[in-house]
Image (cartoon, rainbow, N blue to C red):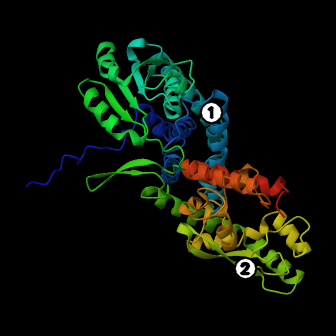
Amino acid sequence: MFEDRSYKRTFYSAPQSVESLVAAFLEPGLIVLTFLLVNGHFDEPVLRPTLTLCLLVFALTFPGRNRFNDHPASAIVDVLSSWVVLLGILLLCGYATSSLHYFETEVLVWWAALTPVLQITAIEIGRRVQRWRGSDPAARRTAVIVGAGALGHKVARALRDSQGVICLGYFDDRNRERLHPDAGVELLGPLNRLSEFVREKGVREVYITLPLGSQPRIVELLEQVQGTTASLFFVPDVFGISIIQGRLQDMNGVPVVGICETPFTGTNRLVKRISDIVLASVILVLISPILLALAIGVKLSSPGPIIFKQRRNGLDGEEIIVYKFRSMRTQDNGAVVKQATKGDARITPFGAFIRKTSLDELPQFINVLQGRMSIVGPRPHAVAHNEEYRKLIKAYMVRHKVKPGITGWAQVNGLRGETDTIDKMVARVEYDLEYLRNWSLALDLQIILRTVRLVVFDRHAY
């Protein structure tokens, strides 16, 4: 008679931990605070350019990365590389807008030197605070795992790596010979002992890792354990799927688990587009003399158009036209497209030079302004190659959940140029999916900086 709304508001997106919240504001706040302190030390007034720089830096670095659990050496390298990338972008913007004269050189130099030192110090302090809190037994939560299979083993390892949780062991009805070998966590008993054990030992958390085929047993367990005060967590067995931006969402009161979604939604989409427009505009202005010289070189190298227009798959697999300086005597753009190889007879001498230095890709900044591409993202492949590889490589088309890029995470990790084996293409796709899982504006800036270095020193493309 009445609509059952008992499911509404039952699920929520996971609340942000205090640690993550601190990390989100630590990096941008520390960078801005250091600049203001150095500015004050040199008795410089806080004028409109100073406030503009502070707002720009905060927008580019928020939210900060959580590095408290990283290895110290890895955290130091990450901080330094991210800071160098950010300084490079700020200097480029300052040069393009002729605004560097608003700031004292001494202030900028001291700011550039002190900021990474203070960031690394703050991360170490945070790491020590975590270790101190984790050493207090009273502050650590006890947990048990239901299901001693491969998934339960993954959860046990994750809990052991956590500072605030003590994993007591597994509950499972199967014989010990059928369980996943793990000497570090003991088998506590069959499932019918779970509820009693939780009450007797005051267990704080229960992780259910049974396969989805065991739904009746899961429901029965939930009914039993809900009679205790333990927090319950169900761990779905989705490790065989490429999870991209997995999160729990509320769709008008209906809980929806996102498994494969683009990272560029909401404010992320706006930030990505604005950064693309600003950077592409600045870069095109700066490289306009180079573009003119390259256009003349292509025209003189061989008969044919200066710009080669190729059909590629863009966002959501839609066909787009991508611009490149023509580097070959032929223009393959049909159902079969042969990849360029070393010593390819189709490539002109001038074409070989612009391919090796990636200068043939520069017209794609126009694609970025058009909204067809992004500066950073998975490299677009020819439509013919996509039709081939989507049948051979698992989750290949997931890389099209974002706009293709001029450069990408795969390219700065050595997978640039010809992919003459299926293994190389699989590796490239894995890097593309890793980019989708871990996207941040700081990662984009890091990739741009590493790309500049590769253009100068790398010679693998042809």
Give the CA distance from mark 2 to mark 1: 45 Å
Q: Quadrant of residue 420?
A: bottom right
Which residue is at 82% across, 86% downward?
304
Secondary structure beneath disc 1? helix
Quarter of the image where the N terminus is located? bottom left
- Find residue 3 and report its horizontal and vertical position in percent: 13, 54
Can residue 234 be seen in the rendering of this structure? yes
Give amino acid for label 1: Ala
- Residue at the farthest left position: 1
Q: Quadrant of residue 306?
A: bottom right
Identify whether 298 is placed above or below 437: below
- Find residue 234 and report its horizontal and vertical position in percent: 38, 36
Q: Which residue is mark 2?
A: 333
Give amino acid for label 2: Asn
* Residue nearest the viewer, comparing 244 with 289: 244
- 364 sits left or right of 455 in the view: left
Which residue is at 48% across, 60% downward?
269
* Residue nearest the viewer, comparing 61 with 397: 397
Q: Residues within 10 Å of mark 1 (few under 14, many from 20)?
A: some
Identify whether 267 is placed above or below 127: below
Question: Do callouts 2 and 1 mark residues in contact (Cβ within 8 Å)?
Answer: no
- Find residue 170 and report its horizontal and vertical position in percent: 44, 22
Quarter of the image where the C terminus is located? bottom right
Which residue is at 39% across, 20% downward?
141
Secondary structure beneath disc 2? loop
Q: Which residue is mark 1?
A: 75
